[in-house]
Image (cartoon, coloured by chain):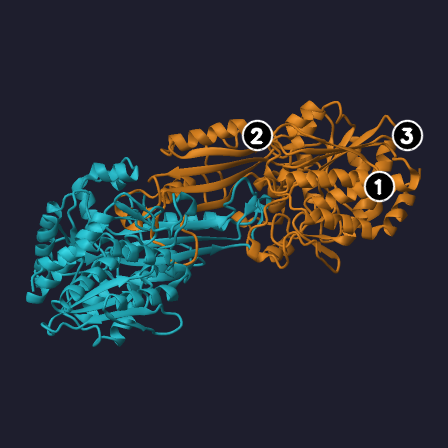
Chain colours: A orange, B cyan
Amino acid sequence: MNSEKPIKFIDKNKNSLLKDLQTLIHQPSISAKNEGIKECSVLVSKMLKKSGIKSEILRLGKNAAPLVYGEVKSKNNPNTTLLFYNHYDVQPVEPLELWDDPPFSGKIIGNKIFGRGASDDKGELITRIKAVESYLKTYGDVPCNVKFVIEGEEENGSENIGTYLKKYKKKFSCDGVVWEFGYVDQKNRPIIGLGMKGLLYVELTAKESVRDVHSSFAVIIKNPAWRLIQALNTMRDENGKILIKGWYDDIKPLTKNDIKLIQKEPFDADGFKKEYGVKNFVGNKNSLDAKKALVSGVTCNIAGIDSGYTGDGAKTVLPGSAKVKIDFRLVPNMDPKKLIKLLEKHLRVNGFGDITINVLNAEAAARTNPNEKIVNTVCESTKKIFGDYVLNISNAGTGPMHAFTNILSVPCISVGASYIFCRMHSPNEFAKIDLLHKTTKNICVLLEKFSRS
Amino acid sequence: MNSEKPIKFIDKNKNSLLKDLQTLIHQPSISAKNEGIKECSVLVSKMLKKSGIKSEILRLGKNAAPLVYGEVKSKNNPNTTLLFYNHYDVQPVEPLELWDDPPFSGKIIGNKIFGRGASDDKGELITRIKAVESYLKTYGDVPCNVKFVIEGEEENGSENIGTYLKKYKKKFSCDGVVWEFGYVDQKNRPIIGLGMKGLLYVELTAKESVRDVHSSFAVIIKNPAWRLIQALNTMRDENGKILIKGWYDDIKPLTKNDIKLIQKEPFDADGFKKEYGVKNFVGNKNSLDAKKALVSGVTCNIAGIDSGYTGDGAKTVLPGSAKVKIDFRLVPNMDPKKLIKLLEKHLRVNGFGDITINVLNAEAAARTNPNEKIVNTVCESTKKIFGDYVLNISNAGTGPMHAFTNILSVPCISVGASYIFCRMHSPNEFAKIDLLHKTTKNICVLLEKFSRS
């Protein structure tokens, strides 16, 4: 089979890609709120079938989002299998008032298609589906076996992906995994990623009075918002350093090879600052330190804090409780379970034992060895289609890569269609249409090269 | 005229009081949201007229809530005037999920009537109206001239009451003011109040990125929630002491007479703790220190804090901004304008000059001299109806008393029907029905005694 032919086929089917992506965007699927999850799983499974991919919906129980499975067996090459991991769920859409169009519009303006999930991850998913569809429609076969594992709770911590992988270990067996997303930088260079950070996401709650009361009582009744703030101040210094004892103990320093790869990565610090409207990086980092931090930095980020009256105008209230959502990004070798214990101990030792901890997500980090064959395969196909690429040893974000590398014991590699400033997780998320088409081509070539590797 | 007769009249009209109070509660009038304000002013003015009180609605401009004025001239005693100050607006009703019935239900269960405003201040207002109505219906006259000043933005800082008082200084001229509310303690003793604390209510906002972004960028983009928390930690210590330089400079210590009066005040510390579900008071205060704090303590209370994602589940977001609402309670001699400058300077000097300050309310404190005649009058009538009373030199809460004592140059005194644990400003606010009736009687007797003082 010649990898050029399906590329031409794709060029003729631009409209079907966009139309199907719009169909996916129109269907809300917010895992954090269990909104539209079941409906979206059915929609995705039907879409796979329409493209000629055998599909079924797998379920674990009431509390787990259904997982959409897809499979095409290769007639020519039945001994090699590539698995596409994606997710059909999306982030919440708040704050609604900052969207120019409704969040599920799928509106196309020039080279952009807008909507929650346009990039993350419905846009990426559609490139994988269309690549496989193009082979099937043109040749009636695929270069190697293809499997799809499309989960429905990635944006809510992928709580059940490990259980799914264990239960369906044989069904999902493969020789390599193409990860759910990949960034493309300002110069149209895909960033090929070999790792993901881990994440520990907790909610801390301080309570005092049984309810919100009149704030005139603040002279004698303690304020849980103040208490939470005092506790938070013991956890992190003003430069972002985490003050929880033992937090950094298991972290291995970057190797010389790691640093070499990081140095090779382009990074437009000024462009980045301009895009986000910030003057300086945390701790006044220079460009190289910023790059190192994106690969190997750990954080204690306040994702949300809420207490008392937060509407318009003045309400003189003493809150009964205060809540903060914190996400800690982790790097390889840090054990989330151990870190939860360190956090508990920290609060207790500092006199904040009454503050409750609710763990919403705990995922370890993962990295694939740069010497794995699949790395070379993906680098070659990407260079062929895009002319250039960047090799990144770890993405700054988190995904359940650790579950795949550990349970399926295969290398994972990340490559995709998401423009680096695509407003992922933010209002007015979009995907660039040309990148969607080029990435579809890239997946086509990659499949062909992988089948021969 | 004999003050006993109108009391009997009131006893026969219990249902009309409750029915009219329900009518007032059913009408939302949330000044912080400008919800139902105009409608409620019309309703109150009509209710005054129905009770035989001449009424008109005064206006200042688009941004000021209308003020309902009422007046009855005494045929027998046209040279003495008592003014009732009340408000028809109420606090916001959030959090809605904690109400057992809808907030504007006016539902009656046993001796309680429930709903936002049941006590604060529609319940108090109805006692004044019904007392005057009882005189008019029984005698066709009142013991002295009566005036009603019923404003519509007390719960939002009474921004325009000073302007109203200045503009209508002659119309509102009087010999004394009965304040808008008064607590009744667990032993059915009305607390007669001679003062109110002041209030400085500000919103502080920290901004960093132009929008909420993916929290994986927290390694390099600063978090405004953390920044706000760092700033807050410079403002107050864990025992509630305000760390803003000069904050305490103008406060005069309590006099020996003040402390004597405070010592006389009953205070059921254990009952208070039980009611609010708290173990210890701020700074482990004992009962006397708690009483002193309620009269003369100043606070820096977080009334609300809000940043990032605060919904259900986990959203990995780095907030673009963070906002906190703070109310500072003030005591006599503290100048809110000066304090705003101290706060600005504090933030600037501590390196937080980028945090913006929005002043939502600034009111000075006020106290009436215990030797004023009206104090004795109110104490006597209250003792007659309730058998006992407590004299309190300052309420822990805030009201625009300073505007009345300064502009009208008359003593103000607070007496009313609100049970001390009536959930004012909180879900399930209620009024005790027997206290509403007894307070109506008290106002009747007080009017009669005041006319002869």
Q: Could you say where residue B137 lies in the image, as x and y percent from the top left?
A: 18, 65
Residue A12 in the image: state x and y as whole percent.
Answer: 88, 51
Q: Which residue is mark 3?
A: A75
Relative to the observer, which residue lies in front, B369 or B77?
B77
Q: Check if mark 2's residue and mark 3's residue have beta carbons within 8 Å.
A: no
On the same chain: label 2 and label 1?
A: yes
In which quarter of the view is residue B125 placed?
Answer: bottom left
- The amino acid type of the residue labelled 1 equals Glu
Residue mark closest to the camera, 2 vs 3: 3
- Of all chains, the one bearing label 2 is A
Q: Quadrant of residue A4?
A: top right
Q: Is residue B126 left or right of residue A224?
A: left
Image point 53% across, 48% down: which residue? A282
Tag shown at residue B316: none
- Relative image position of residue A312 (x, y in whole percent): 43, 58
Query: Label 2 belongs to which residue?
Result: A334
Alpha carbons under labels 1 and 3: distance apart: 15 Å
The chain ID associated with circle 3 is: A
Above or below, B245 against B66 in this view is above
Asked if both marks, 2 and 3, belong to the same chain, the answer given is yes
Q: Which residue is mark 1?
A: A133
Question: How many other residues sit within 10 Å of disc 1, few (<14), some (14-19) or many (≥20)?
Answer: many
Local crowd at mark 3 within 10 Å, few (<14), some, or many (≥20)? Answer: few
Which secondary structure, mark 2?
A: loop
